[in-house]
Image (cartoon, rainbow, N blue to C red):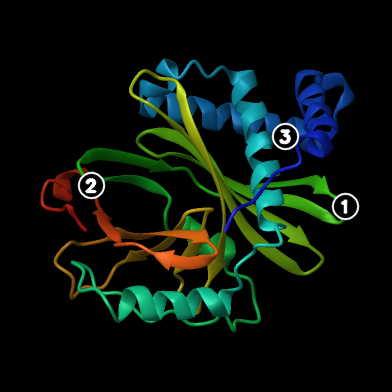
Amino acid sequence: MKAFLNFRAVLPLLLSFTINLERPADISKERDKLNEILLLDYRHLSDFSEQMKAYGISEVSFKNLFWKGALKSFHFYQSPNLMEQYDINNVLKKNLVYQYHLKHQLKVPSMNTSTSDKSSEVLHTFSGEWFGKWQSMDVEHLWLPIRSCNVKIGLGYKVIGFQSCFTGDGFGWNYLIQNGEEITILGHVYHFNKNGALDYENPHYAFLNDQSQLTWVSDNHVYYEFVCEDKKCAFGKHYVITAMPYSNNDTLKFGTPVQAIYTSRNNANKLGNEN
């Protein structure tokens, strides 16, 4: 699955956001409120990790990257190559849950049949500091609380909430996008190399199931994520992420999954990941 973004079409919209973000006198109260929250989140992430400074991210560029990520994930979700939740669930059953024995047991994913939206509630369960290993890399994650806003992103669409994060090798956001009564979860992460230069960007969209688990889809991975508080587990409260790479060159093919379990600093040295 590949998504190609038409930057020529998106650029005027992106520039309008950039101009507005840098000219407070011309923006609405909602945009002012959003700027204040983004500034607060920027400071939280910078205080959490000195790597933010190494990336050379300023307050202004942080705000602009917020909108760039929102637009890229929004257009990726609107790609004709969008995978539907039913198809993704079948992929997870066949290529992950039933095929591999992983450190943390996975539940068979289900469709979301709830009549009320639980997107904010589920994203909130990830809020906090998480520690562990992603393959051989030590990871420190910080997911900030869900922030409310009300800003248009496209015709009939608006951003009604977001969640800022530091991901160990970069930072990004989860976005709640509303269109009528429908709410979609999108995400975008900026990954940096060891020299502090931007390595790659990762737009993605998510499906929420009845078990309060998220299935994220990027252009080359499917991520199955949830927070587990089962008292039968030996880890205490922990965050499980299972990533399955795929390619879509004529035929959809899936690779070997990687699983990581993140927990509090006190328990992080007990946990690792499995290939």
Amino acid identity at mark 2: Gln
Q: Badge 3: few (under 14), some or many (20 or more) residues near its Cα, within 10 Å? A: some
Asked which secondary structure carries label 3, the reply is helix
Amino acid identity at mark 3: Lys
Asked which secondary structure carries label 1, the reply is loop
The residue that disc 3 covers is 33
In front: 61, or 3?
A: 3
Q: Is residue 266 visible?
A: yes
Q: Residue at x 81, y 22 (%)?
A: 19
Q: Is residue 211 visible?
A: no
Q: CA distance from mark 2 to mark 3?
A: 39 Å
Q: Earlier in the sequence, mark 2 or mark 3?
A: 3
Q: Which numbered disc, 2 or 1, marks the residue closer to the eye? A: 2
In front: 28, or 260?
A: 260
Q: Residue at x 50, y 79 (%)?
A: 210
The residue that disc 1 covers is 155
Q: Give left or right: position of 101 versus 50.
A: left
Q: CA distance from mark 2 to mark 1?
A: 41 Å
Q: Which numbered disc, 3 or 1, marks the residue closer to the eye? A: 1
Q: Which mark is residue 28?
A: none
